[in-house]
Each structure stands twice: as structure tokens, then as C-alpha cells.
Amino acid sequence: MQNNSGIDSEAGKIAGKVYFTILAANLIWLLMIFAAPLLETLGGIYERISDFIYIFFSKVCHQDDLRSFHLFGHKIAVCSRCVWIYSGFFLGVVMYPVRNRIANFDTPSLIYLFIPSALLFLDVILDMTGILQNSFFSRSATGFLTGLVLPFFIIPGFVKFFYEVNTFMRNKISYKN
């Protein structure tokens, strides 16, 4: 019988690094979103930093003023749907170790990703076709639900990827020696 405690220990170390990297990156991402209007308000050099943040997020969001929340009299760096996708993702990352082992390689059934994504898609399509105008609530709710489930698919994928890369590199090095 093979002893897997070394494998579990190594997977746990890699998983911890992956998890905390995702958590830290998402926290920085959220802080930047809310820092933009604050920095804009402060003026001077801070306003230039704010401009950079708005430009940075313009690559991933339309930033429509009418579809965005405002803070300190300025829109936040992304629209309402995006802010809730990112907030839901952050909450999902925080909840992940409560529901799963961090070193988990298994993802849930795709139906858990399909349903919120389909609702989000439906909200967008109904609005674009003029059948039903979406609202701050519908954009926020569909964004939040989609963001909330994403970590349960992304974290196991990254953990498995980095575990396999690490195993491959370790085997490659030991083969040479």
C-alpha cells in the first residue's frame, strides 16, 4: 500500500499558496475599484492615480455612468454588475475553505455555474432586445450569483494545475540526478 501523506501534504502547501494568492489578488482588485472615486476626490497626484485605475478597468468594463454606483460624487471604477461579480467572487473565495478542503481538485456540477450564468445572459439579452429593461437590482443580483460560484470552479482548477506542474518539475529534476 502506497503512503499518500507526502502527496496530501505537498498538495496542501500548493493549495494554500494558490488560495491565498487568489484571495489577495481579489482583495487588491476590489480595493482598486473603490479607491478610484476616493483618489479622484483627493485631487492632485491622487487624481492621476485614479485616472490610471479608471483606464485599467476600462479594459474589462464599459463603465457606463448611468449603470454604475457612485461614491464621493464619482462613479466607482466598474459598473454595478461588475462590482457585484467581483464582490460575489470575493465572498466565494472567503467561503471556499468552509465548504471544501483547499487542496480539493474536484469541481461541482456545471449546473451550478450554468444557472447563474444563464440568468446573467438572459438579463443582458432581454435588455439589449428591448423586451425587458434590466435594473440595478437585476444586474447586481445576476452578477453577484455568477461571481459567487466562480471560485468553486477556478480554485480547484488552479490547485490541480500548479500541483501537476510542481510534480512534473520535481520528477524532471529527480530524473536528471
Image (cartoon, rainbow, N blue to C red):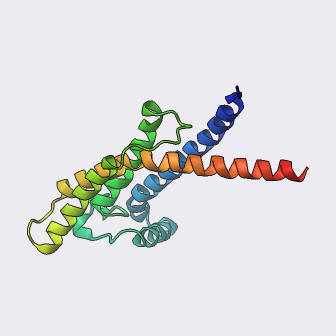
Residue reaching furthest to the left: 131
Residue reaching furthest to the front: 1
Question: Can you tell which quarter of the image residue 126 is in?
Answer: bottom left
* Residue located 56% across and 37% down the image: 103
Q: Specify the quadrant that holds the N terminus.
A: top right
**In the rendered image, the vertical position of residue 172 relative to residue 125, given as above or below:** above
* Residue located 64% across and 46% down the image: 163
In the drawing, does residue 108 fall left or right of residue 120? right
Horizontal and vertical percent position of residue 167: 71, 47
In the drawing, does residue 11 fall left or right of residue 86? right
Horizontal and vertical percent position of residue 124: 21, 66
**In the rendered image, the vertical position of residue 134 relative to residue 24, given as above or below:** below
Q: Of residues 125 and 23, which is closer to you in this image?
A: 125
Q: Of residues 54 and 4, which is closer to you in this image?
A: 4
**In the rendered image, the vertical position of residue 165 relative to residue 64, given as above or below:** above
Question: Can you tell which quarter of the image residue 94 is in?
Answer: top left
